[in-house]
Image (cartoon, grey):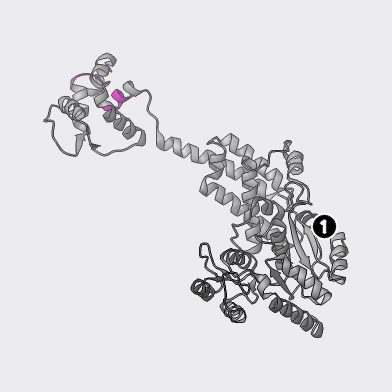
């Protein structure tokens, strides 16, 4: 009999199209669209008006529980007996319009997005990787494949494309056109964007394609260096792909007596400066466009925090000073790029900074990112510095009160404990004689035992 009943739109609307039954109809619609087969439906925390309407509909007491439990068959029989519709599904379709099949729609959507990624995966295999050796090529391919997998798993591409597969395909193709040009030859970011995408601002921070390409660079860099460095700023990230943000002239690194063996302009000026024991500022532009050939494999390169140390080393030691680099406070993009080059060239990096919490913060970054070791920068060295300069007044004998938020020295927890207990900050300038003696000894040792 139920199959012979026609839908009665007017009566159906009068009975169900009421505010007190809206939640019930919503739940029924969701039930059919999601393909739920449960024989009952539960409506939590009902209002009194909802209780009365549903009780009247089913011909049962109002009840007072924390939820209303509705038997689907009972509700369907009410509709059929009143000859409102052949079944409950037909009734809901009349009230809400055609019902979706969410399972099918989800499967179709997943297949569509799978096609987006598969088309680019095929293109990735055909990409001519600009690498210098097999190891670098393998790392680049691994990085790109990991990048694509993460885009799929984390949903970033879908968010950037605002859920539109066609937009996603376009973004991926644009990203790949940029990736094919990497690593660059020191061109600016705007030039790269203009030449590959026809828009000088297409790779500006916040643009979708820029976000995708930067993620790819991170993955390639991590695959090549087997690290999970997430501390690079945007300028450093592009620099690792030999792309300059702006002119890259204002980002600099202060160096003294770095050993080189090449014949580029940068090699020549570094060599000339070292021959005279003179400090030298290197720009990020130089380090990317005209990088030196570092002769540092197995050699120790010292790093300090303050330029006063470099100035004193140049003045008093000159050519007899071991290779020295200065962070000049928080490391710049040029400094980080230089340290990465030296690390990749086999240098042993040693770090010293101020015995204060900002100094510990910088040391944590340098040691974590570049595998540097402490250079007279541990609990023992701190205690020696205290003994050599006994505490007088607050600013007496090179001592200052240690203030600010405590920072744990990741390489030596005993240093943190000692500094916290003594509450004394010691700037590098106050242990200058100790550092200069160490730099001279290291240089003399190398002269006696050249590598």
Q: Which residue is mark 1?
A: 290
Placement of the C terminus among the 4 image quadrants: bottom right
* Of the pair 239 and 431, the residue shown nearer to us: 431
Q: State which quadrant residue 300 falls in.
A: bottom right
Does the rendering let one see residue 6? no
Name the residue at 46% across, 39% down: 107
- Dot 1, crowdedness within 10 Å: few (<14), some or many (≥20)? some
Name the residue at 62% across, 43% down: 119
Q: How many marks?
A: 1
Q: Which residues are magenta?
A: 82-92
Name the residue at 67% across, 46% down: 123
Above-or-below relation of 155 to 441: above
As for residue 89 lying within the magenta part, the answer is yes
* Of the pair 140 and 269, the residue shown nearer to us: 269
Residue 398 at x, y = what percent?
A: 63, 72
Q: State which quadrant residue 6 falls in.
A: top left
Q: State which quadrant residue 19 falls in.
A: top left
């Amino acid at each position: 009999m139920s199959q012979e009943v026609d839908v009665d739109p007017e009566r159906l609307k009068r009975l169900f199209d009421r505010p007190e039954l809206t939640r019930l109809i919503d739940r029924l619609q969701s039930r059919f669209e999601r393909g739920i087969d449960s024989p009952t439906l539960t409506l939590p925390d009902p209002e009194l008006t909802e209780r009365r309407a549903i009780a009247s509909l089913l011909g049962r007491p109002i009840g007072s529980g924390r939820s209303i439990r509705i038997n689907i068959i009972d509700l369907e029989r009410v509709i059929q007996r009143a000859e409102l519709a052949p079944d409950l599904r037909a009734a809901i379709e009349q009230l809400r319009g055609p019902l979706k099949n969410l399972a099918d729609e989800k499967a179709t959507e997943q297949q569509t997005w799978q096609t987006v990624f598969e088309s680019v995966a095929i293109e990735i295999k055909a990409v001519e990787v600009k690498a210098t050796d097999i190891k670098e090529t393998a790392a680049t391919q691994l990085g790109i494949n990991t990048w694509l997998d993460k885009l799929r798993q984390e949903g970033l591409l879908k968010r950037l494309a605002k859920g539109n597969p066609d937009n996603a395909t376009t973004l991926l193709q644009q990203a790949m056109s940029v990736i094919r040009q990497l690593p660059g030859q020191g061109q600016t970011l705007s030039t790269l964007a203009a030449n590959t995408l026809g828009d000088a601002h297409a790779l500006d921070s916040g643009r979708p394609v820029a976000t995708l390409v930067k993620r790819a660079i991170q993955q390639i860099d991590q695959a090549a260096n087997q690290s999970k460095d997430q501390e690079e700023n945007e300028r450093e990230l592009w620099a690792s792909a030999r792309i300059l943000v702006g002119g890259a002239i204002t980002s600099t690194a202060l160096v003294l007596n770095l050993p080189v063996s090449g014949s580029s302009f940068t090699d020549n000026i570094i060599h000339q400066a070292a021959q005279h024991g003179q400090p030298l500022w290197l720009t990020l532009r130089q380090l990317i466009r005209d990088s030196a050939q570092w002769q540092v494999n197995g050699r120790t390169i010292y790093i300090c925090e303050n330029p006063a140390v470099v100035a004193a080393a140049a003045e008093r030691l000159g050519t007899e000073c071991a290779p020295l680099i200065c962070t000049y406070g928080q490391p710049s993009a040029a400094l980080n790029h230089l340290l990465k080059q030296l690390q990749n060239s086999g240098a042993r990096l040693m770090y010293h900074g101020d015995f204060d919490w900002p100094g510990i913060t910088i040391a944590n970054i340098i040691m974590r990112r570049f595998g540097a070791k402490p250079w007279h920068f541990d609990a023992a060295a701190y205690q020696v510095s205290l003994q050599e300069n006994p505490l007088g007044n607050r600013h007496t004998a090179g001592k200052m009160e240690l203030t600010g938020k405590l920072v744990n020295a990741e390489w030596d927890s005993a240093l943190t404990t000692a500094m916290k207990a003594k509450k004394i900050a010691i700037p590098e300038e106050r242990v200058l004689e100790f550092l200069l003696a160490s730099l001279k000894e290291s240089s003399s040792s190398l002269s006696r035992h050249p590598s």
